Image (cartoon, rainbow, N blue to C red):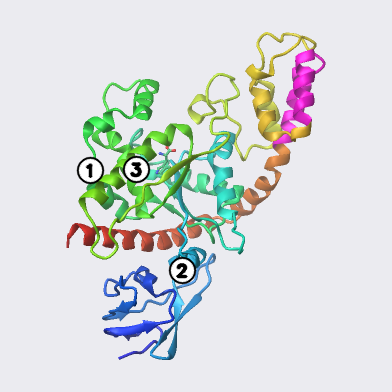
Amino acid sequence: MFRNKKGSKLTISHIHITGCCFLPDLTWLGNRMLYRTYSPKLFLCIEDFEYKVFVPTITSKIHTIRFFLSGNCYNFFCNQSIRDRQGSLKREEDGMKTQRILSGMRPTGRLHLGHYTGALENWVERQNETLADGSRAYETYFLVADYHSLTTSLDTSPLDQNSIEMVTDWLAAGIDPEKSPVFRQSRIKEHTELFLIFSMLITASRLERNPTLKDQIRDLNMDAITYGHLGYPVLQAADILLYKGNTVPVGEDQIPHVEITREIARRFNNQYQHPGTGSVFEEPEPKITRFSRLVGLDGTAKMSKSLGNTILLGDTEEEITAKMRKAVTDTEKLRKNDPGRPEVCAVFSYHKRFTRSQDIDEIEKECRSGALGCVDCKKRCVDSIIRELAPLHEKRAFYADKPGLVRQILEDGEQRARERAQATMREVREAMRLG
Ligand code: TRP
C-alpha cells in the first residue's frame, strides 16, 4: 500500500495524519489524485499518488519534507514550489497571512534606469526582506509578459532575445532565481485559461474606461484596437491571481490594471465559492515605488526606450558620459555661472536618486548660486550612477559570459511557476464545477 521508493506509486486512502505541517500543501506536487484536506483534523485522501522525482538543475537543490503517519515517519523529496514557500508555510502555521508578490514587465530588451528605479530595485528589496525570525517577508514571482507584447506589436521575432536580455538585467540587478521563480508567461498555459474565464467577469465598457489604455491609444496614434489589447488588464489579472499575488509593485500607470484585478477577484468570489476553502482569490494591493517615474535625458518625458532618452543598466562609463553630455538641464542656465533651477533639471533628478544624500544639498545650493556649472554637475552625476551600477555590471558580465544559463534559469522558474499555476486552476475549476 505504501512504497516510497523513487518513481514508485503510492496508494494511501483515508488515513488520519497527525503532526504534519506540510501536508495541506502536497497538492502542489502536481498530482490530481492528491487532495488538499479542509477539515481541521487534516483528513487526507490520497489515491494513486504518482511520485515524480524532482530533477535538480543548476539553480536548485533537493529538499525533503517529512510527515508522520500512524506513528511512523515518512520522508518525501520536496518539490520546488514547497521549497519556494517554506517561510510562508511556517507563517501560515502561526496563523499569519502570506505576503506574495507577483510582478512583471513586457520584454523590451535591455533595461534602463527608469526600469531600475521604478520597479526592479524594489523587487530586489522585497525579495531580500526578512522578518524578525529570519524568514522571508514575501514570496516573490517575476514574470516576462511576452503575451502582453503582442498588444502593441505582432512581430514575435525579437521576443526571445528581448526576454533573455531583460532577464539578464533582472539577474544583474539582484533577482535571485533561487528565491524568486522568473518565467515567461507564454510558457505556462494556465495564463490563457484563467484569462478566458476572467474575461467573462468584466464588462467591455469597464475596460474601455481604462485610462492607461486611453493614454496608449493617444501616444501610439492608434485608430483601432484589438479585442486582445482591450483585454490587456484581464490577462494581467490572470498573471497576478494565478499565483495568488496579494502585493503588486508597479509604476503609476499600472494602478488601473491592479484596480481591475481587484474587481475581477471580487466578482469571481461573489459568483463562485470553493467547497472547501470558500473564496479563491484575495484582492491584491498595488505598491507604487518611490521613484516610479524617472524623467528621460530630454528632460521632458518619462525615460523610455521608444523616446531614445535612456541610460541603460548595461551602459559603460563612456556611454553614460556621452549620453549625459547631451542631457537637458535648466534651459535658462546658459553660462556656467548663471544661477540654475534644480527643480526643472533632469540631471538634478538623477542626483536626487543616485547621489549620496549629504552631497545633494550642496549640489542644489551651488547650482542655485551659480557656483556649479552643468559640466561639472553632470560629471558628478555620472560618478554617482557608475557607483550604483558597478556591482550590477559585474553580475551582468557573469551571466553574459554563460550563454544558456539564463535560459536554464527561466526553464527552472517555469517549472516551479507552473506547479503553482496548476494548483490555482484546479481550485478555480473546483469552485466553478468545471471538469
Ligand atoms: N502591464 C505591465 C507593464 O506593462 C506588465 C505586467 C504584465 C505586469 N503582467 C503583470 C505587472 C502582472 C505586474 C503584474 O509594465
Highlighted magenta segment, given as a residue range: 359-385
Q: Is mark 3 within 8 Å of ligand 1?
A: no
Instruction: Tell me where residue 216 appears, x and y as whole percent.
Output: 38, 26
Q: Earlier in the sequence, mark 2 or mark 3?
A: 2
Instruction: Provide the major secondary structure of the magenta segment.
Output: helix
Q: Indicate whether residue 361 is drawn in magenta.
A: yes
**Mark closer to the chain start, 3 or 1:** 1
Image: 395 above or below 258: below
Residue 177 location (% of width, % of height): 53, 58
Q: Give the image location of residue 91, x and y in percent.
A: 49, 64
Within 10 Å of the Cα at label 1, are there few (<14), some (14-19), or many (20+) other Cα atoms?
some
Residue beneath label 3, please?
Answer: 262
Q: Secondary structure at mark 1?
A: loop
Q: Is residue 383 above or below residue 137?
A: above
Indicate whether residue 229 is drawn in magenta: no
Q: Amino acid at mark 2?
A: Glu
Quarter of the image that includes the N terminus: bottom left
Residue at image point 37% right, 76% down:
52
Q: Earlier in the sequence, mark 2 or mark 1?
A: 2
Disc marking residue 201: 1
Q: Residues within 10 Å of mark 3 (few under 14, many from 20)?
A: many
Q: Are marks 3 and 1 in contact (CB under 8 Å)?
A: no
State the residue at coordinates (77%, 9%): 338
Is residue 420 positioned above or below 327 on the image? below
Q: What mark, if any, has residue 93 been given in the picture?
A: 2
Q: Mark 1 is on which residue type?
A: Leu
Label 3: which secondary element = helix
Whether 289 is drawn above or below 84: the answer is above
Alpha carbon of mark 3 to alpha carbon of mark 1: how far? 11 Å
Which sits in the foreground, 168 or 130?
A: 130
